[in-house]
Amino acid sequence: MTTARPSTKASNTAPTADTRIAMYRLLVELRYFEKRAYDLFLQNLVKGTSHLSLGQEAIAAAFGVAMRPGDHTFATYRGHAHTLARGVPMGPVLAELLGRENGLMAGKGGSMHLTSVEHGMMGSYAIIGAHLPIACGSAWSAQYRGTDEVSVAFFGDGTTNIGAFHEALNFAKIWDLPVVFVCENNLYMEYTAIKDVTAVEHPAADRAAAYGLEKIIVDGNDPDAMHEVATAALDRARAGGGPSLIEATTYRHGGHSRADPAKYRPEAEVQEWLARDPLPMYRARLIADGVAEKELVAIEEATAKAVDEATEFAKAGAAPGEDLLLKDVWSDGGWTWRN
Amino acid sequence: MTTARPSTKASNTAPTADTRIAMYRLLVELRYFEKRAYDLFLQNLVKGTSHLSLGQEAIAAAFGVAMRPGDHTFATYRGHAHTLARGVPMGPVLAELLGRENGLMAGKGGSMHLTSVEHGMMGSYAIIGAHLPIACGSAWSAQYRGTDEVSVAFFGDGTTNIGAFHEALNFAKIWDLPVVFVCENNLYMEYTAIKDVTAVEHPAADRAAAYGLEKIIVDGNDPDAMHEVATAALDRARAGGGPSLIEATTYRHGGHSRADPAKYRPEAEVQEWLARDPLPMYRARLIADGVAEKELVAIEEATAKAVDEATEFAKAGAAPGEDLLLKDVWSDGGWTWRN
Amino acid sequence: MAELTYREAIARGIAQEMRRDENVVFLGEDVAAAGGVFKGTVGLLEEFGPKRVRDTPISEQAILGAAMGAAMTGLRPVAEIMFSDFFAVCWDIVVNEIAKSRYMTNGQVSFPLVIRSGNGGGLRFGAQHSQSVESWAMAVPGLKVVVPSSPVDVVGLLAASIRDPDPVIFLEAKALYSTKGEVPEGDIHDELGKAKVLRRGDDATLVALGSMVPRAMKAAEQLATTGIDCTVVDVRSLVPLDTQTLLEEIGRTGRLFTVEENPRLCGWGGELVSIVGEEIFYDLDGAPVRITTPHIPLPAADALEDMAIPSVERIAERVQKAMQE
Amino acid sequence: MAELTYREAIARGIAQEMRRDENVVFLGEDVAAAGGVFKGTVGLLEEFGPKRVRDTPISEQAILGAAMGAAMTGLRPVAEIMFSDFFAVCWDIVVNEIAKSRYMTNGQVSFPLVIRSGNGGGLRFGAQHSQSVESWAMAVPGLKVVVPSSPVDVVGLLAASIRDPDPVIFLEAKALYSTKGEVPEGDIHDELGKAKVLRRGDDATLVALGSMVPRAMKAAEQLATTGIDCTVVDVRSLVPLDTQTLLEEIGRTGRLFTVEENPRLCGWGGELVSIVGEEIFYDLDGAPVRITTPHIPLPAADALEDMAIPSVERIAERVQKAMQE
Ligand SMILES: Cc1ncc(C[n+]2csc(CCOP(=O)(O)OP(=O)(O)O)c2C)c(N)n1
Ligand SMILES: Cc1ncc(C[n+]2csc(CCOP(=O)(O)OP(=O)(O)O)c2C)c(N)n1
Ligand SMILES: [Mg+2]
Ligand SMILES: [Mg+2]
């Protein structure tokens, strides 16, 4: 198991106390939210598929805290965590999973396509690799417009073997684009171990040199380490230093998607990683570092309540009507292809 | 300019005297053939586009000699040299360029798609990158069928930035396929310098490590060096050692295609490379190494005659008729999509 | 005679052909150890081993390139593209390479390969996992295109596709994976290019494909109770297209209704109407009508998806309305 | 009023829009320093500089991904895909991402971008550099599809496409690059979704697109000498489709002939016939006829390519034959 600390120099970028609390709050929110989403799935209320980040939350939480308003997030179908991490409220996200009219996209996108432009959440993409070049585009736009906005694309280990990954990384480097590529290496694609189908040990980091980039591997279950690496990459991009490629090692607690019991993983491996669950680990660390437990309990209780409220909000939503069906293919709000 | 010798260990693979003569014969054939093709283009007899390898012949010649019957060649639109190097006769190739019925594919493919399966020339592919995964397929087939056939894919520097390159290299490595990828780095894509659009200095070799492969750079204008590298890679593949990626540095004497006067290249660079023309260089080396000049002159004269004959053959060909138009979409020889 | 699901029929068909011909090999993402994300290929790895049944990386161009290169050098690969939407990431290998290379080389190479893929909507997967791409494939010269609508057709048409010397795009209707049907024991192989008349009526001809076939059948039953007696034809194979059967069955009733899951523009139904218009115009007794998904991306929510894809009710209503005009 | 070639009209159109709106940027392979492999973008780098006119690597997915990401964050990119055949290597970005994302996000994002590409045959480039892909694009909900047939339309439709808030696939007929036409001075912008009636006759309506427009016009002239007086309509925009003009002009003569460069199956002409069949069936006086390239990959040899693509003679003969039946 990789527990390497960031290879970028630890500068004065260690997270502050406030930042650490903010990260803990996010960790709790992402965890409670997805546990609820899973409950609702078991109650047959979640329509279609869904892909949980349970166990992988530290990556989204660290970036969520490290990114600024104006920065752009591009995520995959496994995008609940990244969406919430940008401040998108839980209610509409949950409602979207339930296919309701009050969903984030009125039910038209579903779990795999969560998007909230007002929060800088520029979309969740369900075709492997596609959003990496798209993130290059928003980074190009930021550069062209003379802003210091950064685009961040999150993706899995399996994504490193598709063509779009290669094109995007080279493109980002030659145009010095302010984009951060974050590979969440959870050791598996859907049901196949990444090591069985990849020519190198570290599917992202071992490719960095092919794009003139630094090799960065970080413990994706350690919020502090993640935050340090994230901040360094974001700062670099903001300062005109171009792209970074980060490989964050992590593990999903459950299956790939709702249909998957994840029997293909060795029990010992699962246990080893469950023991490294970012949530209790970070909780213990904060307490050890002097944070009052009751502060954490307050966060947990508030979040539990918020999740309940979000659930009520979502369940109360109506089924989307026919007006939505034919809405917004085009910018005029309509769908007609003829006069 | 890269003049590196092969980084693979020079074993007892230095070419024999016979091999060197065979390479010279091919060099002359490829050169004379393409000069004739260019003349015919100026006479407006070549239909459509064509892409010459003038200046780059040593790569095709070395592999042509090093490969065995049963091995499979996959080339690009710049494929005349690789086709002839596998022993395909000049007449039908020239006739194909002229769009004649006696062309290698009866005029249906044209210059960019030269194919002669009986010679192991498995096709010339005109969409950048596509033939790399296809070569993986023929290599997989060879492996599956328990033969020691090797597949070789030739492509340009510009091709290293497209997705298919990435997918093919990783795939070849994880399945240990008997395939050799040969990047002919002629410093330019169509009109754009490869260095302007690539994140690394050596577009192929600097990516080898990303696929767990050895970095191999060779002087593509030196037939002996090329032969050594080619033989090593072919042997390795034949012995079950898996794929290789070779970057052969070279230069095209003319433009990208018939329409291109190649004004975008600095004059000094052109001159430097013309001074390293593989044909006179190798001729001088052979003579210095004791080969009788008249042996070389005999080859040159015979080749000139053969090119003239091929020209007559091609010019004598009729325009393809309507029977060919609708032939061989399907294996039953026909084209019908309905009953 | 056993009852199989549509999904089980896939493994049955592939296994039958792998037993028959050792040159048949199978590759795709999560198809071997996991038996496929739709569980369509369970048991193949166990029976045929890792040399013939292979998991791949997420590299669709490599998957299809490998299939193509293997097909042109003696194997008969079956490749899986998990969802047909993903054809978009490897479309070049399909349309520019596999489809054209036989013709371009004047017949020097053959491509006896099958590309299977889960196609269409109904599972609330949203716009990137629900498309009907049959017309994409039909538009490309050099591809055969097959879409089975029942378990027995899955086995028979899969066998015919694997034995066919040309490239076949084999689209499985995702919405039908869990439907069941009788499948006889023993070797089953069907023929490409034959439509099936599932029901005969004199008033109108409904022509349907894939997931729309059971819906067209149900609509026909409903319509029968209102006095409209329909013929239902299952196209089964878009290329080659059984125009003989289709023109006969359409000409006989004089009324054509296509039932298409695809978004409207350039769907196979348009092609069919144009063939009918050109060849049996004077046999038509009324305007040919196309019933399709509206020309929109598919929405994810169950309520919306159900409105988008032609339902039994919509089919029946549209036919009834047209027949009354 | 200057005479411009079709290829020169491209740079004229892009330059006009780049002057008007600094958010218009342009990228593609060999488009800047070299001015494009078809010399369609000569002078743009010189006028607008390397920040706005950019050469890219051979990475079509990156090119279109960059265009998409830029469009959704405030720019109005024009991207070039050198030959439309290469859409196959980046089809995912076009059909799954650009086309669908506005709908999937319930309208949160817009994609004001144009993808230009050289389309079609006639230059003896062979099957991988000569395809007509207009029906590929037309089949995808969420894309507008424009095909100009003259220099003035290139400028006007390009301007309209760049100003349009939605993604436009702008297909330039390669066969027309060196043709000339008058183009007025000053700002020119046309409207998407308007067909143009180029000629009016009472006997039959020829509906053509792109490179087929001049051929249909010549065929109409020949037919006029044999007493068959044709209307010729240039479709110009497949999406949005000007069904109003088309139905009116087809209904008026009662006879429809589509002239399509694409291989037959699922071409735009099939769609048009199906619309006509459904909506003005009773106005038709005879079978609608499609004149297309046969359903084969395009051959390279000049003699073969000329046989494959509808020629003036073939169009005229086919119309004459049908009108005599
Ligand atoms: C082009 C493409 N191929 C295949 C899939 C199906 N698919 C969805 S998720 C997935 C596994 C992705 O693995 P990874 O990148 O490691 O991400 P993770 O799910 O582990 O977060 C696959 C194969 C897809 N969505 N797109
Ligand atoms: C996917 C794709 N994009 C673009 C092209 C157009 N094109 C043909 S050759 C070429 C340059 C290729 O450069 P390189 O790989 O270096 O090969 P070279 O021509 O130098 O041998 C380009 C861009 C193409 N054929 N296919
Ligand atoms: Mg993973
Ligand atoms: Mg080159």
Image (tube, coloured by chain):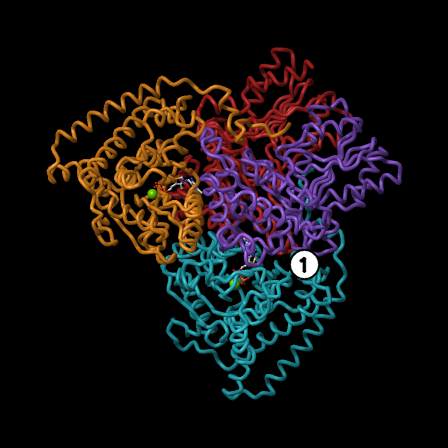
Chain colours: A orange, B cyan, C red, D purple
Measured as percent of width and height from the top left, residue D277 is found at 71, 26
- Counting every numbered tag in the picture gives 1
- Which residue occupies 26% across, 24% down? A306
Camera-nearest residue between A60 and D54 = D54
State whether label 1 is within 8 Å of ligand 2: no
Measured as percent of width and height from the top left, residue D33 is found at 55, 58
| Residue B201, quarter of picture | bottom left
Q: Residue furthest front?
A: D186
- Vertical relation: C225 (above or below) A9: above
- The answer to whether residue B332 is left or right of residue A286 is right
- Residue B137: tell me if it is visible: no
- Residue D182: tell me if it is visible: yes
Q: Which quarter of the rendered picture does the C terminus of chain C lie within?
A: top right
Q: Residue furthest top?
A: C226
| Residue A67, quarter of picture | top left
Label 1 environment density (alpha carbons within 10 Å; few <14, some 14–19, many ≥20)? many
Measured as percent of width and height from the top left, residue B172 is found at 42, 56
- Vertical relation: A43 (above or below) B134: above
Q: Amino acid at mark 1?
A: Gly
Measured as percent of width and height from the top left, residue C158 is found at 53, 38
- Which residue occupies 81% across, 35% down? D230
- The answer to whether residue A303 is left or right of residue B193 is left
Q: Secondary structure at mark 1?
A: loop
On the rendering, which quadrant does ligand 2 occupy? bottom right
Q: Chain of mark 1?
A: B
- Which residue occupies 27% across, 51% down? A217
| Residue A124, quarter of picture | top left
- Vertical relation: C160 (above or below) B142: above
Q: Residue furthest right?
A: D226
- The answer to whether residue A171 is left or right of residue C206 is left
* Location of mark 1 (residue): B48
